[in-house]
Amino acid sequence: MSKLYRSTRDRVLTGLCGGLSEVLGIDSTLLRVLFVLSIPFSGGTTLFIYFVASLIIPKEPNYPFDSFGPRKPGYPGYNDFGSNYSSTFGSTAGTNSYNNGSKHTGSSNLDAMMEDIEKKALKKEVEELRKKLSNYEKGEV
């Protein structure tokens, strides 16, 4: 069971219903409708409990920026900057037709191509520097 937080992604007022819906695994809209319908039947007690709970329950922690929005550990696509991608993308993530089976954990074809381009550019730069150095040593400035 996951820890209860006030949601930062699915919030209307405080994020409490969004966080509860994530923990309980139900739709947040349904939970909000049930909450509003329960207010007159409880004499306003659920409203009081809601605000007290929103003061006690912490907000969802902010994780490193992700273009898909904040994610929690254990959610698909979560990366803690150092874990391998094989658990997220499956065991065949590092092998593709471009890199001929070499191990590029979590790399796509584009990443492997960019890596090769960078290596070639570095080799070319080293060759140019060696030529300049040999010309300098010969006195051909």
Image (tube, rainbow, N blue to C red):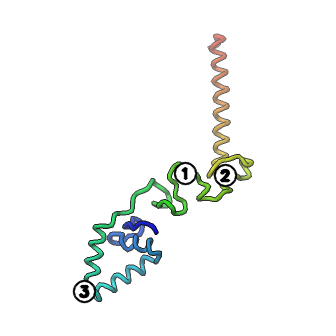
Query: Dots 3 and 1: beta carbons under 8 Å?
Result: no
> Disc 1 marks which amino acid?
Ser
Q: Give percent across and percent down for residue 112.
A: 66, 47
Q: Earlier in the sequence, mark 2 or mark 3?
A: 3
**How many residues crowd mark 2 within 10 Å: few (<14), some (14–19), many (20+)?**
many
Q: Earlier in the sequence, mark 1 or mark 2?
A: 1
Q: Which residue is mark 2?
A: 94
**How many residues crowd mark 3 within 10 Å: few (<14), some (14–19), many (20+)?**
few
> In the rendering, which numbered label is found on residue 83?
1
Q: Quadrant of residue 46?
A: bottom left
Q: Which residue is mark 3?
A: 43
Q: Give percent across and percent down for residue 117.
A: 66, 40
Q: Quadrant of residue 47?
A: bottom left
Q: CA distance from mark 1 to mark 2?
A: 14 Å
User: Left or right: 52 with respect to 104?
Assistant: left
Q: Residue at x 40, y 79 (%)?
A: 31
